[in-house]
Amino acid sequence: MDTAANSPVRVVVLGGGTAGWMTAAGIARMLPGLAKVQLVESEDIGIVGVGEATLPHIRSFVEKLGIDEAAFMKATHATFKLGIDFRDFGRIGESYIHPFGSFGEELKGVGFHHYWLELQRQGLARPLGDYSLAVTAALANRFRPPAQDDTLGSTYGYAYQFDATLFGPFMREFGTSIGVERHEGLVTSVERDSESGDVTALCLNDGRRIEGDLFIDCSGFRSLLLGQELGAGWEDWTHWLPCDRAAAMPCAHATDDIRPYTTATAMPAGWRWQIPLQHRMGNGYVFSSAHLSEDEACETIRASAEGKPLADPRILRFRPGRRTQSWSHNVIGVGLASGFLEPLESTSIYLAQMAITYLIELFPIGGGIDSRDRDEFNRLVDMEYDRVRDFLILHYNATTRDDSDFWNHVRTMKVPDSLADKLELWRRAGRIEKYSDGLFYDASWIAVYVGQGLLPERYDPRPALADPQNLSRAAEQLHAAIAQEVAAMPQHREFL
Ligand code: FAD
């Protein structure tokens, strides 16, 4: 890169899927005057077009971009999401919600779950979800955005569930309205500097050349620049996360209710998603091709659909893992081009958003790329992927299911050391590894541990020193306050 100190960096985004338009709009909006953004996409190739459930972080992205929430939700037929309902994961017939919010709140420096474990020992505990506003509201199909001055003792956030085929066009319109220059065309070759190896231009099938200083690879699973052109390595995680296919089939709503949450139901060779949108239900079976054929998966998804199918099942193929470097030379991979983890916790769009945020923080403003920025970007992206990977593996490994080869494999496999350490911390003392940034804090881990029947051998001894009656009364008061708050919320469909 030899951009003069004050002239805008010429950014070329390859790909107009969710990742491409989020990146282009994010850079154009957040680095005004510092970057000139062009985007190349090809209608011949199209986009993945699934990916409908998100995490609460997307709200800050939408807000930073200056997008009006109501307009965005209307355009993408979005619903609100308070968490994910996991069914049959720990044991067939059992379910729990992983909420976007807390269970109770810390008291005198001791996490609420330690009090809950003590109440449980005394036989006085309600199900953990009864102390969560998000869980209680979700199960009642009710929704209202959290109040700013929430002092109830259980905080919550929310995300969106939207139609991925409408999100791309919405972001495209928004991106072009804030100055992103769009090129429709198929990239057939890539020009590189003979000395540095940096990419210098993308060549389209009609002879056009799109030159740039910085290239963002959002070309999806193809990973045209990062993977194919620069040969960035791939860390394969199939041995931990054997699901490598999905059969997706949208359906009409079967009932009048619209759930404010996603449902994930464990299946003999993977799991099934149900994502309620305003106008339909997203449906899909994520499965391991080593344990189930594509035809069998399609039959299963047809047979398990609750509403009228709106299309035939569509098979998507993927490999779980990530690039060993998401930033190589002057190319940065965002979205599927940099890695993929199955949508069990709706993390892909989050991972793209995080990469964009880190890129903006470490952006090579007006000059050459500093290798320390590149290393830091790669470190942060790896950390995010690795943490999500561990969290996903937990859902499979913390199970008593022994009803299929698939579950026997994931229940007995050796997990990554980083997850083994976290499990040990929990088992021995009910503790959660502390993070200062990134995804999945205490409540998320606690939801899955407890929800899947993995209780610790010991926990903080301080709750046992409290007067049992006081403890139980305080917990009942919290539950009653939550129930009252939820009863005052409108039905989700009504609120929409
Ligand atoms: P794509 O959508 O594949 O876009 C690639 C773009 O590159 C296209 O515009 C294409 O035209 C362009 N392109 C490629 N090659 C060329 C070329 N040679 N010339 C020009 N243009 C080119 N994520 C979530 O957060 N939540 C979910 O619930 C969720 N569910 C999912 C379920 C499944 C089964 C799968 C497979 C994914 C899911 N995801 C989910 C992930 C989510 O779909 C993706 O993260 C998201 O769509 C981003 O995709 P992308 O933009 O990286 O790639």
Image (spheres, rainbow, N blue to C red):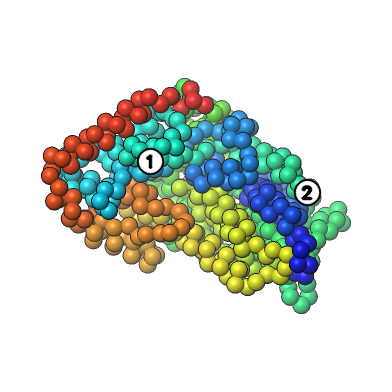
* Relative to 206, 404 lies left or right: left
Viewer-nearest residue: 22 or 226: 22
Measuring from the top left, give residue 318's x and y in whole percent. Answer: 56, 54
Per the image, the residue denoted by label 2 is 181
Residue ID at (41%, 40%): 156
As helix, strand or loop, the secondary structure at mark 1 comes to: loop
Viewer-nearest residue: 180 or 284: 180
* Relative to 40, 111 lies left or right: left
Which of the two discs, 1 and 2, labels the residue nearer the N terminus?
A: 1
Residue ID at (48%, 63%): 383
As helix, strand or loop, the secondary structure at mark 2 comes to: strand
Marks 1/2 in contact by CB < 8 Å: the verdict is no
Looking at numbered disc 1 in the image, what kind of residue is underneath it?
Answer: Thr
Q: Residue furthest bottom?
A: 195
Measuring from the top left, give residue 273's x and y in whole percent. Answer: 47, 40
Residue ID at (62%, 32%): 71
Measuring from the top left, give residue 467's x and y in whole percent. Answer: 12, 44
Residue 171, by quadrant, is top right
Q: As displayed, is residue 489 above or below residue 286? A: above
Viewer-nearest residue: 441 or 208: 441
Q: As displayed, is residue 431 above or below residue 324? A: above
Q: Is residue 318 visible?
A: no
Q: As displayed, is residue 163 above or below residue 438? A: above
Per the image, the residue denoted by label 1 is 155
Residue 378, by quadrant, is bottom right
Viewer-nearest residue: 284 or 65: 65
Q: CA distance from mark 1 to mark 2?
A: 41 Å
Measuring from the top left, give residue 319's x and y in whole percent. Answer: 54, 57
